[in-house]
Amino acid sequence: MDFIITFEENEKAFIVKVNGDVDAYHSATFKQKIIEHMNITDRKFIVLNLGEVSYIDSAGLGSIVSLIKESKKKAKEIVLCCLQPQVKKIFEMTKLDKIIRIVDTVEEL
């Protein structure tokens, strides 16, 4: 499966749409591209739309934790949205759902 990241902005947020697995193979690219765009947007919310992500491993989770730390330095907030049930369960099992906001849709922001 291809790994594709696209970016868009709305009035409230900078939205990162991810298509593909966020795993050891793709996590460095995932993190690097998001940080590059996080540095140039003036939006407070960075929404990671993971609706097309069916698998995330520990490297992917580590990248998201890194992004949370980086966003706090820049007074921004990472928000996850549109998680598939199996991906949401991983965030719940690792208790990361306690440190990052998860919403069902971008409009909930």
Image (tube, helix red, strand yellow):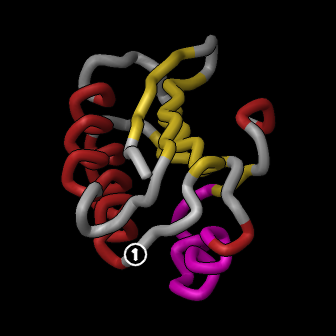
Quarter of the rendering containing residue 58: bottom left
Quarter of the picture containing the C terminus is: top right
Q: What stretch is highlighted in magenta?
A: 87-101
The furthest residue to the bottom: 93
Q: Nearer the viewer, residue 28 or 93?
A: 28
The correct choice, above or below, for 67 with respect to 49 in the image is below
Few, some or many residues within 10 Å of mark 1 (<14, 14–19, 20+): some
Give the image location of residue 37, x and y in percent: 30, 26
Viewed as shown, does residue 93 lie left or right of 60?
Answer: right
Q: Which of 74 and 95 is in front in this view?
A: 95
The correct choice, above or below, for 22 with respect to 89 in the image is above
At 56% from the left and 82% from the top, the residue drawn is 95
The main secondary structure of the magenta stretch is helix
At 47% from the left and 51% from the top, the residue drawn is 20
Give the image location of residue 98, x and y in percent: 59, 73
Secondary structure state at the residue bearing disc 1 = loop
At 39% from the left and 45% from the top, the residue drawn is 2
The correct choice, above or below, for 97 with respect to 75 in the image is below
Amino acid at dot 1: Asp
Viewed as shown, does residue 57 lie left or right of 49?
Answer: left
The residue tagged 1 is 57
At 27% from the left and 18% from the top, the residue drawn is 40
The furthest residue to the top: 11
Does residue 96 show up magenta in the picture? yes
Quarter of the rendering containing residue 87: bottom right
Give the image location of residue 79, x and y in percent: 56, 47
Give the image location of residue 59, x and y in percent: 29, 71
